[in-house]
């Protein structure tokens, strides 16, 4: 057996052992998935709702002004 083949074999076996160890660690430490039922889910903050409503009003105003300017042409 050549030294290169021996060295390659040792490195591949070491890498394989390292991957097996990492895979086992990940498998053991995997947390469960938490699901929040809809009834118990927290509501959106008021500020977010207000910002969303404000954006919708701006969008409607832009659409109205675009329609009005199109009618004038």
Image: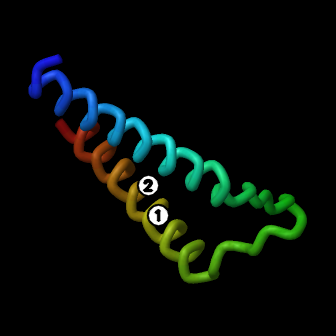
Q: Quadrant of residue 59?
A: bottom left
Q: Is residue 53 above or below residue 70?
A: below
Q: Residue at x 20, y 27 (%)?
A: 6
Q: Residue at x 51, y 67 (%)?
A: 52
Q: Quadrant of the N terminus?
A: top left
- Judging by the rendered image, the residue that carries numbered circle 2 is 60
- Judging by the rendered image, the residue that carries numbered circle 1 is 57
Dot 2: element: helix
* Of the pair 44 and 57, the residue shown nearer to us: 44
Q: Residue at x 43, y 65 (%)?
A: 55
* Of the pair 9 and 66, the residue shown nearer to us: 9
Tell me the distance, in whole angstroms, between the alpha carbons under discs 1 and 2. Answer: 5 Å
Q: Position of residue 71 (x, y in %)?
A: 28, 38
Q: Is residue 2 left or right of residue 72?
A: left
Q: Is residue 9 above or below residue 39?
A: above
Dots 1 and 2: beta carbons under 8 Å?
yes
Q: Position of residue 13 (x, y in %)?
A: 35, 34
């Amino acid at each position: 057996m050549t030294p290169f083949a021996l060295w390659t074999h040792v490195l591949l076996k070491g890498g394989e052992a390292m991957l097996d160890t990492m895979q086992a660690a990940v498998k053991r430490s995997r947390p469960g998935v938490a699901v929040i039922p809809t009834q118990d889910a927290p509501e959106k903050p008021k500020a977010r709702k207000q910002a969303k409503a404000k954006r919708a009003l701006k969008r409607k105003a832009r659409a109205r002004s675009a329609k009005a300017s199109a009618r004038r042409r």
